[in-house]
Image: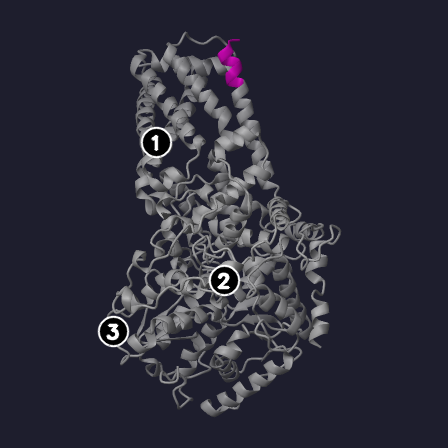
Amino acid sequence: MSDRIKVKDISKASDQMVQINLEDLPPLPAPYDKVENLPGFKRLTEQAKDKYDGSLDGVVAAGLPKPQSKEEEQELVDKFISGIKKLFSKNNNWGFWQPLVLSMEHCARCQTCNDDCPVYESSGHKEIYRPTYRAEILRKLYYKYVAKGTSIGKKFQHGDIEVNWTLISRLYELSYRCTLCRRCAQTCPIGVDNGLVTHELRKLFSMEMGIAPKELHEKGTVQQMVVGSSTGMNSLVVKDNIEFIDEDMTDRTGMEIKTPWDKVGADILLLHNAGEILAWPENPGAFAVIFEAAGLSWTMSSDMVGYDGVNYGLFYDDVQLARIAVQHFEIAKKLGVKKFIMGECGHESKALGVIADRIMAGGIPRESAMTILEEIVFSGKIKFDPSKNDFPVTLHDPCNLTRAMGIVEPQRRILRYLAPQFREMAPHGVRNYCCGGGSGFAIMNSNNFVDWRMHISGRKKFEQVLMAFKDEDPTANQPKYVCAPCSNCKGQMRDLFDFYGAKEKSGIHYGGLVELIVNAMVDIKEPFIDFDMM
Amino acid sequence: MSVLHILSYLTLAVFVVLVILRMIRIGSAPVHLRWELYPIPHETGARAKYGGSKMEEVDFWTKEHKSNMIGELKVMLPEIFFLKGIWEYNRSLWTGSYPFHLGLYLIFINIALFIFAAILSFTGSQIGADQAGIGLWLYWATYVISWMATVIGTIGAARMLFLRIVDDGLAKYSTMSHYFNIILIGAFYFTGLMWVALDPNLVENILSFFIGMITFSAMADFPTIAYVHIYIGLFFAFYLPFTHMTHFFTKYFTYHKIRWDDSQVAPGSAIEKRLAEQLAQPVTWSASHIGADGTKSWLDLATWAPFSDKKEEKK
């Protein structure tokens, strides 16, 4: 069925455009190569089908409730069309107007980008997952409602598309079938960016129609601005949790660890993804150990939003992104710090380090943790024994750190020094594959989306991890470490390895970079990385 | 002045004006948020190869960073002249796309040579097979390039048409204009090939066209196929600025001004002033959480304390 799908079919009501069958997907390496031994792909429940339109691919990630009347349906259509117009207005979308219009007007439809998309490839080349599929829909809408020209001329050059509820509901879901990794954009000979197209579609839905996945909006940016963190931790809770982590670090390292809070005039404001504090407490703990051992002047902030570097606005809403970035800047200014250090979080680093650069021109400088960690490791301030990390290690490159920021080598130089069995994945660096949890997917678990995330968007990365360790003892007897210096990527790794049973079957574990650094410290007697506890 | 003169001048004027207007439209677009994509070839040293950035350095904003424009040229020139990106990532398409484009490049080289020859002829130098020196060299160069351009271009157009029809991915995303464009350009090449093959006075006739254009004087009486070729070419030049084929110059923006634009905003810079103006623009997005009313600006909305009612509820 999917082979016959055309762009205009997005508007044609049908039970389901695409059916995902595990037999159609490219096989994984052994021992994950037998479909019958893999977890199945859950179908939507009848309850979910009643509430949401699952007719795109039988998966509901974002979940737009079905309209209850013709009037409601028409209202959605009208809002959608007004959103299309605003997306291409300079006032409303100055931040991306130029790249978006260029991508709309100059694509040669050569399809060169398709094979670079891990989702398209891992789906067994399902038509709707081509990077060009959703871009072509938006292009037709752009020419239909925005671009100047005669109707005949525009149809001749770009074809036509019918706008109805079916298109809107499917396109909304489809905007959450791309991880915004922008690998496709790297290979476009014209410079068209289909990752940007996905980003802009999500903005249209959020900023005009007020619809976005609850994990990103209600539980994400809104909760962050209401409570202080997308994790739901308020200031008191986060300080309590960090105090507990400090105590644990003190016990495990023998060093007196006490995280400084709200220290005016400190050199560094350390901004973690607050998810680390709850899910991987050893990560902020290891940062504290390293910073204290190196004698840095640093602080964390207990102000609202000031202890959570998460900014999911990056994935779906420019205004929400700007609001959170502005608060981050205000807090740093209030503390009078010299710079931010952005913890192990890719999207935080991109949002604050790159995107916010032209929102808060001349604001407090921002720096990725990778650079300062490299400086510390090679400064001689801390003694290391690399043999303490003598187990197979590979590195996952977070897209936002590498492809979007060009921070590639500092983490590698650390690993080459501190991890004797470090090896690269193929490909790596700026040509890496996304973990499959990018653009917010790692925290999106509605309905059967997790199965899609594990079987399709994460498939390529899982294959890469297995191949990186192909020359090792394949069993769990040999623990293996995937270093993923990004919170969202770690969330995806956790889910992937649990889903496939990779820890039990292959001894594959994951963690951050700082944990490896602390594990190699001479002054710390007990192993910081304990594979039995991971 | 003949109809051919008038149409040629008109087409040239339309082409130039429309391309300039399009450049102005894109060049004067609002300053966009940073959306760079690595590798960025104006990085220096090893970073240009592995895709590193200045952000790999501690306190990078305090250091002077040089931009290596030669690095950008090293990427752009192979991309423009050899379509390197398609060669690397879509080899099958390259077998059609490259000759398709190369034909045009050769025609542009020939146009430049003929304009040079026309100017040379005003000094009394003659161009021809029976001449010596530069006159002889120009004769054979333009003659050989005429053959090469039209043969290579015709093969490229045929291959592109074949791929657009038989390749599932290309066929599904091709509109009527894609086929029309290829057929149009293919017809331009093929009629050019016919002219080259059938006209014993080819070089003299083409030179006569350019001399006539430059001096507003009468041109030679061309074979019928030559008129067909020239009118197709004129229509193509007139039509091109209305299509996606303007990527021949918009690539400068997509590469240099977006993909490779990693510049930070310096305090007091022109960009900072433009950004301040953009942030002062009113916003009309309709979603309730945005809080836009048509008068509030981007800055108002970004610094507005939203969700205060929810904060109260939490308390």
Q: Nearer the viewer, mark 2 or mark 3?
A: 2
Instruction: Count neighbours of disc 3 (C-alpha within 10 A) and say few if under 14, some if 14 to 19, many if 20 or more.
Output: some
User: What amino acid is at disc 1?
Assistant: Leu
Position of A95 relative to A227 (above/below): above
Residue B139 located within the stretch drawn in magenta: no
Residue B3 located within the stretch drawn in magenta: yes
Chain identity of mark 3: A
Q: Is A480 left or right of A226, judged from the image as shown? A: left
Q: What numbered label is drawn on residue B161?
A: 1
Of residues B148 and A434, the one drawn nearer to the viewer in this rendering: A434
* Tags 2 and 3 on a common chain: yes
Residue B73, position as x, y percentages in the image: 43, 45
Residue B296, position as x, y percentages in the image: 74, 54
Residue range highlighted in magenta:
B1-9
Instruction: Count neighbours of disc 2 (C-alpha within 10 A) and say few if under 14, some if 14 to 19, many if 20 or more.
Output: some
Q: What numbered label is drawn on residue A472?
A: 3
**Mark 2 and mark 1 residues within 8 Å of each other at the beta carbon:** no
Residue displayed at 42% across by 46% down: A188
Chain identity of mark 1: B
Q: Which residue is mark 2?
A: A48
